[in-house]
Amino acid sequence: MTVKKFDLGILCGQFLSMQDHEAKVEKNIFIGLKKDTIDYIGTENKKEECEQYIDASQKLVMPGLVNSHAHLPMQLFRGLADDEPFDVWLWQHILPLEAKLVSPEFVKLGTQMALLEALSFGITSIYDMYYFENDIADVCHSSGIRAVVGETFGDFPAPDNKNQNRSDLKIVQSMLEKYGTSHSHIRPILAPHAPYTCSDETLSLVRDFALKNKMTIGIHVSETKGELEKSLTDFQKSPVKRLHDLGVSEAPCIYAHCVHVDDADIALMKKKNVRISHNPEANMKLGVGAAPVPKFIKAGIPTGLGTDGVASNNDFNLWKEMDFAAKLAKLSNSDNTAMTASDALRLATSKGAEVLGFEKTGQLREGYLADFLILNLNDVNLIPSQSTISSLVYSTTGREVESVYCHGKQLFHKGEFKTLDKDKIIKECETYIAKNF
Ligand SMILES: [Zn+2]
């Protein structure tokens, strides 16, 4: 028996590669995979050379989506204290409940629930930041998704650092021993919660550990006006300038939110190795403002899209996030060209991949890893369509995602999960909620 050239071949009716960050749809393209990698892209249908073949001639194939900021276990808080003021929501509801409930059991269950939703919407890479991150890393690993996993640091008795004896650092060390810094799917990082919850000493400790071990730092930055004002009062500088002066941004950094930043902050972030996660829906829901994303893009700072936790969103639908990102930029700049549908697609795919740092992801091209989606666009909300790019951003619901592949492996197909037991997870979740909330 002869060995076929491709493990999997797909005939794509519409093909969106995002090559070189360009949002351009091509018709009737064949892609051939060898194991986890895209080996061939062209117009010639090489069906006979494929072990397995998918006819997607009536469908669209595109890169998997990248969620650049999330708190997976917060799935279990969906709908909690919605519509309360930000400080009340955080300090009176979320943080006390986290202190009471968050445990390895809580984070494993919440992460499984969150991954069901994330995969169903076509997310193939994610950046998570939470507690007991080693347990979250293991759940992500067994699901087959790519995940940057950030253990939270702060100067408060966190659920996994109750005695404030740096057990957070021990969790980072254990992840580092298990996965290292260049694992194909799981990349541990350090995630100080925010400048306003971390002392100079804590931020310096994180910086030193990151630089020594060649790790990335992820942190919430300038999310609210109150945070900026307090920093100006306490330190006479903005949160971005404080992180810069402390040398935190000497390490590669992912700053989430960056709503209240000025031109000087943007110049500092550009000068150092900072990448930004834009979270339009969470920012809108918590009423904190609109981040100056067109300025980030113009400055050349890699910027991705994030859902944030479901407690402040309230879903993992990155399709809605693209829609909101474009419309919020248009509204807040009083300029309907401030962000185009192509810009929004870039944030959710190729640029998001730059933010997370997984090499050879975020674009479909020869030699790149096979993280891709097959979408069925044959529904009344998408017919007719004068522009596929516009429809993907402004008209999809997220339920058009038919198949999800990460690293060449199918993780989701027509409502079925290949690596997660949906019914069992939902049952366990319902039991946990009934018992503990
Ligand atoms: Zn967050």
Image (spheres, rainbow, N blue to C red):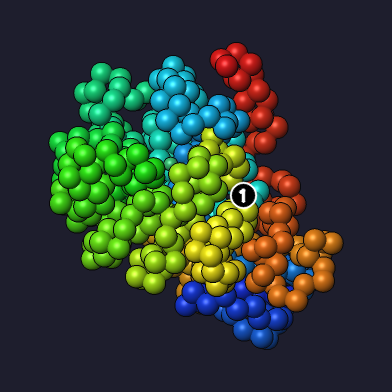
> Furthest residue to the bottom?
44
Pointer 1 residue Cβ closer than 8 Å to ligand 1: no
Query: Which residue shows up at 21% across the image and 39% down it?
Result: 233
Query: Which residue shows up at 67% across the image and 45% down it?
Result: 417
Indicate the position of residue 151 as horizontal and vertical percent values. Answer: 34, 38
Q: Disc 1 marks which amino acid?
A: Asn
Indicate the position of residue 230 as horizontal and vertical percent values. Answer: 27, 38
Which quarter of the image is occupied by the N terminus?
Answer: bottom right
Q: Is residue 142 left or right of residue 255?
A: right
328 up-or-down from 197: above or below: below
Q: Which residue is mark 1?
A: 317
222 up-or-down from 405: above or below: above
Q: Tell me, yes or no, if residue 355 can be seen here.
A: yes
Q: Nearer the viewer, residue 294 or 236?
A: 236
Quadrant of ligand 1: it is: top left
- Label 1 CA crowd tier, 10 Å (few <14, some 14–19, many 20+): many
Q: Nearer the viewer, residue 410 or 210?
A: 210
Query: Splitting the image into 4 quarters, where does residue 102 fall?
Result: top left
> Furthest residue to the front?
334
Label 1 secondary element: loop
Query: Splitting the image into 4 quarters, where does residue 224 fall?
Result: top left
356 up-or-down from 32: above or below: above
Query: Which residue shows up at 70% across the image and 32% down it?
Result: 423
Indicate the position of residue 83 as horizontal and vertical percent values. Answer: 57, 32
Q: Nearer the viewer, residue 4 or 175?
A: 175
Which quarter of the image is occupied by the C terminus?
Answer: top right
